[in-house]
Amino acid sequence: MNKQLITLVGTNTQLLIEVGDFAEILYWGNALPTGHVTPTERIALARPVPYGRLDNDVSMTLSPELARGVFSSPGLEGHRGAQDWAPAFVIEQYEQQGDSLTLTSVDSVAGLRLVSEIALDSHDVVKTRHTLTNLKSGLYTVNRLANTLPMPARAQELMTYYGRWVHEFQTERLPLLHGGYVQENRRGRTSHEHYPALVAGTPHFGELQGDVWGFHFAWSGNHRLRVDAKTDGRRYMQAEVIYLPGEINLAENESLTTPWLYASYSGNGLNQMSQQFHRHVRGAILPAEFHQKQRPIHLNTWEGIYFDHDPSYIMSMASQSAQMGVERFIIDDGWFKGRNGDKAGLGDWFLCQEKYPEGLHQVVEHVNQLGMEFGLWFEPEMINKNSDLYRNHPDWLLAVEGYEQPTGRNQYVIDLQNQAAFDYLFERLDHFLSTYNIAYIKWDMNREVVQPGHLGQAAAHAQTQRYYELVDKVRAKHPSVEIESCAAGGGRIDYEVLKRTHRFWASDNNDALERQTIQRGMSYFFPPEVMGSHIGASHCHSTRRRHSIEFRGLTALFGHMGIELDPVAECDEEKQGFERYIELHKTLRPLLHSGTSWRIPTDDQAHLVHAVVSDDQREAVVLLAQLAMPTHALSGHLRIPGLANNTRYRVQVLDKPSNYQDIVNYQPPWTEEGCELSGSWCAEVGLTMPVLDAETAMLIKLEAID
Ligand code: DGJ
């Protein structure tokens, strides 16, 4: 095919793709004023061919092939009984429709077709995936099928993620000079350890400066992410599902489609990248039907009562919650048959008659009469051996016969490819959703997957797909029910699960100090409204630290807010605090859940500052969190980006620590009296930082006055 130059244009960014026998991205960066590229400009991009290598120039294609002389990680690895293992696809046709390009390539020798899709939308988010089809007789075994995107040679630093239970979304910086970075997740869920995203950028890229390319792989199971600096200096990012041995075998005319890889370029650092992803999440990922609804404030019972359920006590918890301004009351784990601890009951999705002798209706009705929605916890994919379900169906485990696999939280996983098991789970969920006025499900998944076997064969990929199918089926029958994705806290947080859910439980760690870092890490790819963020008890259950109600309240404010404790047992002072932050959240949530988020760099690592500016730039809120003791006696200036340069704003402190005046001789007067500043002053000159104790915070509001 004659070479053609295709341009995909977003709002700020552009992709230039050359399509001939194969497709190569020649440019991915800021939008060019003319939009398209002339033949002369194309000449400027022709590469030299150095000695000591293959005699021809070798392109980094959308799916790198060994057969074309690409020595990096190929886009496809597979074989047909040890044949057809080094394919070279030739593009037969392509179609550009609006912001997306679809390329169809065939290798007639290997008998394979590869359809590659790539799009760049108005939010400046690229998405790409491949579909491989076996065109010949004989099973084609796929070992790997990856999405590949190139980056320019100036992408020399990485920001990657690590973490664990109660310590999600931690970030790390690594140089990308020679060789590369590989992250493998084999835990069977998105995982706390290997969140499927990373950022590459120019050296020392920051929140407000540097070129960055952010990547998010939308898949809730095993994955591999790779970023390589090739020996010739070119760089690329690759994302793929890890297929277990023998897992994918395509019969003639059968296809395999990869998950979507999402990516976004920013020439202005991480904030712009996140803003592009946030807009994409709001406009193209989150289920559209809930966009108009304010996100209700939660009371979740877990850390309040754990497995100790008494309906009359729960109803008094609900009454107290309603008085404090809570709008949705959720009964967490412990309500179903045999569930008195974490060793038994999973799978038996029948109301526990001993705990709820009068049934659940009276509780749900009580909650509804108080004006709150009702939510219920499930962990559908799991089973305890100590359950009627297991006693009746020992063959429903996702396991390999002949092996005893290790348990996680004393439980096993149900094989969702087993149709009877799948149907049972759907029937149980459907029963509860049809019988009670349930507005919300907290859908949990508390263990990792070991030996995911179905009829002896590896089934990790299919298990994840069947999980999506189960959620989709529930949603199709009960479209108004909202779902939270939870997996022992933040173990299943990704864009694919968000297409069918509404909120994430970011972490089981409600410690406000830890939450500041967790929520910061999550904010790179997710807007605040999908981040479940609860005020926990003053004595944090996961870290044993104590925090003031102000620090807990302000930290929970910047997400989808809730309370996670027993309100009946709390003192009046605490309750007044909950009421205050609930009220504040209600006032601010239209702004927090629709505006533009900014992570604001400061002069001291001991601060973490986060702002949300309304789309019309008429108002903003800034949260100044003091994580540790200030490094210096004076902490420099708070400079706030994102406001309109020529607009004047009234600056006011909305909330501060109760001992604020007692810890210094004088605090900066603007924190008491407020002041009026222009947007450009805020961005360039800023405000003097106050002195704050470690583990406290201050909330600042800016409102346009002209
Ligand atoms: C893990 C979740 O993250 C918690 O919030 C809670 O729902 C427990 N599971 C219940 O078992």
Image: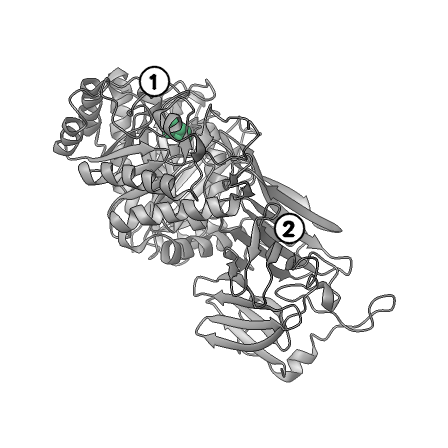
Q: Quadrant of residue 382?
A: top left
Of the two numbered discs 1 and 2 in the rendering, the one whose residue sits closer to the viewer: 1
- Residue 180 appears left or right of 140: right
Depth check: give the residue in front, 326 or 34: 326
Bin the neighbour count of mark 2 within 10 Å (Cα to Cα): few under 14, some 14-19, many 20 and up.
Answer: some
Q: Quadrant of residue 580?
A: top left
Image quadrant of ligand 1 equals: top left
Helix, strand, or loop for circle 1? loop
Helix, strand, or loop for circle 2? strand
Residue 634 is situated, as x and y percent measured from the top left of the image, at 53, 32
Residue 204 seen anywhere in this rendered image of the structure: no
Q: Residue at x 53, y 78 (%)?
A: 34
Residue 640 is situated, as x and y percent measured from the top left of the image, at 45, 47
Q: Which residue is mark 2?
A: 226
The C terminus lies in quadrant: bottom left
- Residue 310 appears left or right of 594: left
Residue 465 is situated, as x and y percent measured from the top left of the image, at 45, 49
- Residue 604 appears left or right of 319: right
Q: Is mark 2 within 8 Å of ligand 1?
A: no
The structure's colour scheme is one colour
Q: Residue at x 35, y 31 (%)?
A: 534
Q: CA distance from mark 1 to mark 2?
A: 44 Å
**Is residue 655 positioned above or below 190 on the image?**
above
Residue 567 seen anywhere in this rendered image of the structure: yes
**Is residue 278 positioned above or below 582 on the image?**
below
Q: Which residue is mark 1?
A: 340
Q: Amino acid at mark 1?
A: Asn
